[in-house]
Amino acid sequence: MFNTQRFFKERFSSHVKETSRYLRYIFNGHIAIAMMFFVSALAYYYQQWLAQIPTNFPTASIVGIVLGFITSYSPVRTLLKEPDLVFLLPAENRMAPYFRSTLIYSFLIQLYLIFLVAAALGPLYFTSFPERSGKDYLLMLVVLLVLKVWNLLANWWMLRIRDPRSRLVDHIGRFILSALIFVFYVSSEIVLAGITTILLFVNVLYAYILAQKHNAIAWDLLVEKDRSRMRTFYRIANMFTDVPHMKNQVKKRHWLVALITKNIPFQQDRTYEYLYRITVIRSGDYLGMYTRLIIIGGLAIYFVPSLWVKVAFSILFLYLTGFQLMTLWQHHRTVAWLDLYPIHIKSRQAALIKWLFQLMLVQTFLFGLLFLLMKLFTGLVIVWLAGALFSYLFIHGYVKKSLI
């Protein structure tokens, strides 16, 4: 007889092994050091900013919006796979214990985000309202956990509705109501917070009633939702290590490819130079990662007040870019045709080293322009010189030795 609890334990064990295998690569020593530096710098300047926060700062609105988003965003991880569309369909009426376990699992894995956000917003809350005690903030966290359960259940019930617009409207409605509850609570408008809580409960109750009218489980929708989240996870993991079973999305981007490759002559020894360039441009993973690091690094440089910390952030994001782009070397390793190219491996290494060095120089140049925009001419000179020197040493020292 089919045992749903044993099936959940097997599926959960398989899922944990799969994700932990890639998490070891994501949170390796290099990234851990970079993240520690990044978080430490942000915490330091966050404390400095709180020391001079204006009295009219909209703390209630910011806390409400952030907690409203954290509360309403409650995805359900069912751990279902595509073959389940066939093999589990006959056992649909016995799957309630399995889905109950997945709901508990979904709630528990989202607790870390709640605690991180609560820890980040705590200093802002107590700085804006020094007269309030820790019990007030603790009570708000209890309310947050209760509303999280409500939103998780509502999201699960709405997954029986196939119309995506109905699910989107429901999600937006729950986000607005959840955010207003926290805005009113932080503003000490307890009556309004209570009325909004009742409205949210009615919304959740409506989702339950609506789900009862659609008794059949939307198996294909559940599988697609879980597959989409795993694709996102694999896409992140692929920045740090090779994910063989991930299907890479390739985009044409004709104009950008033409711009990047127009100066490469049609010669045999320039084959890999052409290949690595179009790989970065046409693959959403590399180009997206490169763009995001430039944007995030630029924001960090712009908002951090100290000149030397700005320079340090510039070097940090150069390092992250170079380190993550090293996976280009293994990107085509499953393509057998490349082994037939009559090209020496040193030519391939030289092509990758040259391309990575050029990408890091472009990033250095853009960071320097940001210093120019802020009229920090000393920082401009330091970043361009230090960035170019770091890029050269990192590429020809670390990367070159790693290309085996």
Image (tube, grey):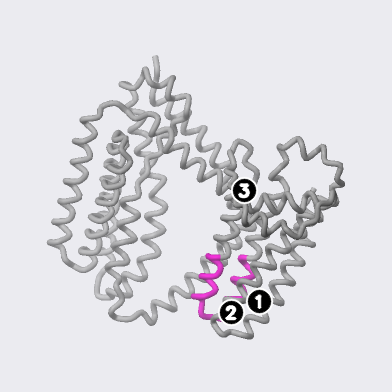
Q: Is residue 168 above or below residue 31?
A: above
Magenta stretch, main secondary structure, is helix
* Horizontal and vertical percent position of residue 400: 79, 56
Q: Is residue 120 left or right of residue 139?
A: right
Q: Is residue 157 above or below residue 288?
A: above
* Horizontal and vertical percent position of residue 13: 50, 33
Q: Amino acid at mark 2?
A: Phe
- Label 3 SS: helix
Residue 306: say if magenta: yes
* Horizontal and vertical percent position of residue 105: 39, 39
Viewer-nearest of discs 1 and 3: 1
Q: Is residue 372 above or below residue 24?
A: below
Q: Which residues are magenta?
A: 295-317
Q: Are marks 2 and 1 in contact (CB under 8 Å)?
A: yes
Q: Which residue is mark 3?
A: 25
| Quadrant position of the N terminus in the picture | top left
- Label 2 SS: helix
Q: Which residue is mark 1?
A: 383
Q: Nearer the viewer, residue 71 or 166?
A: 166
Query: Distance from label 1 to label 3 (Cα)?
Result: 30 Å
Sequence-wise first label, 1 or 3:
3
Numbered label attached to residue 371: 2
Q: Amino acid at mark 3?
A: Tyr
* Horizontal and vertical percent position of residue 167: 30, 43
